Image (cartoon, rainbow, N blue to C red):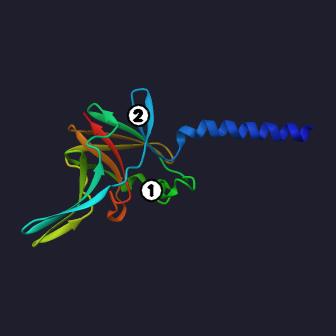
Amino acid sequence: MKKLLLICVLCLSTLGLRAQTASDSVGIYAINGNMVAPIEALSYKSLKISPGFMSAKAKLEFRGKTSPHHFNGTAKFRVYFGSPGPYEMAKLYMFTPTYSIDEFGVGRFDVKKDSRYLTTTKVSIFGGSTGVSEADKIDFNVSKVRPGVYEVTVTGAPGEYCIMHMYKGSAGYSSVFDFTID
């Protein structure tokens, strides 16, 4: 009887621990007032190549002209690193302990009609560059809350932005976490 009672207590305490750490799930969470909401990884719809006479650009196209996550002037996020579950590993690999917050940056979308675009490659007869450039004129401040947990504050001009994993030029190609500054 004591063994059965001990097993029940251990099971209940394990459930309690899971409930306490549910908010610490791996990924990026938008903090807007008292609301905390996970931001889903957004994958690109297509790759557009814009040829020019002496230059060309490659752009990733993302669905929708705006993000569901809107902020006034300053966007605030909580970023959690850890071990995603097996079903989430493919879309949240960038939050494993192998990577760090230093490998993330903010990009700015160009909005046209009902889509948002990130330029990933620029080529001309004089040379070229690959990888998404971090957004100009934006403040990206990171503070450590505790090991594996960071608070990120982004301040910038009104527009469509995304937080992206920039490891070895992969920005945008794996996925992005979109938001809007009004």
Instruction: Name the quadrant of the C terminus.
Output: top left
Q: Secondary structure at mark 1?
A: helix
| Residue furthest out toward the top | 34
Disc 2 packing (10 Å; few <14; some 14–19; many ≥20): some
Q: Which mark is residue 94?
A: 1
Look at mark 2 in the image and give the residue it sits on: 31
24 relative position to 102: left or right: right
**Which of the pair 14/110 is nearer the observer?**
110
Please tell me in which quadrant of the rendered image residue 49 appears.
bottom left
Residue 4 point in image, percent of width and height: 88, 40
Instruction: Name the quadrant of the N terminus.
Output: top right
Please tell me in which quadrant of the rendered image residue 127 appears.
bottom left
- Image height check: is 73 above or below 121? above
**Which of the pair 81/181 is nearer the observer?**
181
114 relative position to 4: left or right: left
44 relative position to 52: left or right: right
| Residue furthest out toward the left | 53
**Residue beneath the point at 34% across and 58% down:** 166
**Residue beneath the point at 17% across and 69% down:** 128
Please tell me in which quadrant of the rendered image residue 157 appears.
top left
Residue 107 point in image, percent of width and height: 27, 50
- Image height check: is 70 above or below 162? above
> Hey, what amino acid is under mark 2?
Ile
**Residue beneath the point at 52% across and 56% down:** 89
Residue 145 point in image, percent of width and height: 47, 40
Q: Going from the N terminus, do you reach mark 2 or mark 1 first?
A: 2
| Residue furthest out toward the right | 1
Residue 46 point in image, percent of width and height: 29, 58
- Cα gap from disc 2 to disc 1, whole angstroms: 20 Å
> Hey, what amino acid is under mark 1?
Met
148 relative position to 65: left or right: right
